[in-house]
Structure formats: structure tokens, C-alpha cells
Image (tube, rainbow, N blue to C red):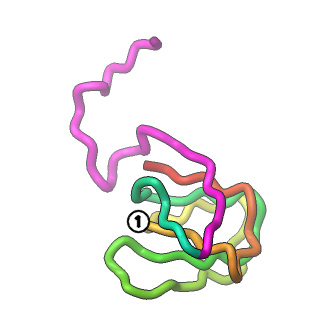
């Protein structure tokens, strides 16, 4: 394993992500774990459920290469046109 001088640092919402995961939008299931931010590889709309919300929100016309710094628990398939999504946690 590579040397990590920050391995004993505590994690926080403003700390860089420690892990990344491909996101497959799903209308019924939440993500395996909440994420701190989402990277958009191919631009479009994203329909998602924030961690502390009871309803979905639509981010319209998100440009490719954008990192949205929002904690999400779900990304929905219906209405999501963006692709190549990566969750940062």
C-alpha cells in the first residue's frame, strides 16, 4: 500500500474524499452509503435525494467535469440524463 501521511487524520465534510464509487442511478434504491460530493463525467440533468431530505431535487444542465459538493443518499434513473457519475465519500 502506498504511503499516506494523512491516514490518521480524521475525516470531515470539508476533507477530500477518501474513496470513490461509480454511481448507477436507480429509482427505488438508495446508494450503498451517503456521499460527500458527486462528479459528473458527461453533462446533463441529475435527479437526486439529499441526505436530510424527504424529496428529490433536480440539478439541471450540470456541465461535464463538475463536482457538486452536496451530500446525497440516492441518484434517480428517471430524469437523470447526466452519465459517468462518480460518488466521492
- Percent across and percent down for residue 87 are 54, 53
| 22 left or right of 73 in image | right
- Percent across and percent down for residue 47 are 60, 79
- Secondary element at image label 1: loop
Residue 31 lies, with reference to residue 16, above or below; the image says below
Image point (46%, 64%), residue name: 69
Image point (36%, 71%), residue name: 51
Decide whether residue 6 is among the magenta residues: yes
Q: Residues within 10 Å of mark 1 (few under 14, many from 20)?
A: many
Picture quadrant where residue 53 is located: bottom left
Picture quadrant where residue 55 is located: bottom left
Decide whether residue 57 is among the magenta residues: no
Residue 5 lies, with reference to residue 32, above or below; the image says above
- Percent across and percent down for residue 42 are 77, 61
Image: magenta residue range: 1-27
Image point (40%, 13%), residue name: 3
Of residues 18 and 51, the one nearer the viewer is 51
Position of the N terminus by quadrant: top left
Residue 21 lies, with reference to residue 45, above or below; the image says above
Predominant secondary structure, magenta span: loop
| 23 left or right of 34 in image | right
- Percent across and percent down for residue 64 are 74, 62
Which residue is label 1 attached to?
71
Image point (64%, 62%), residue name: 66
Of residues 1 and 13, the one nearer the viewer is 1
Amino acid at each position: 500500500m502506498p504511503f499516506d501521511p494523512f491516514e490518521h487524520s480524521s475525516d470531515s465534510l470539508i476533507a477530500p474524499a477518501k474513496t470513490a464509487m461509480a454511481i448507477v442511478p436507480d429509482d427505488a434504491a438508495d446508494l450503498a452509503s451517503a456521499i460527500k460530493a458527486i462528479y459528473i463525467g458527461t453533462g446533463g440533468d441529475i435527479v437526486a435525494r439529499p441526505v436530510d431530505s424527504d424529496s428529490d431535487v433536480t440539478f439541471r444542465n450540470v456541465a461535464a467535469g463538475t463536482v457538486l459538493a452536496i451530500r446525497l443518499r440516492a441518484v434517480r434513473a428517471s430524469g437523470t440524463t447526466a452519465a459517468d457519475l462518480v460518488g466521492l465519500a
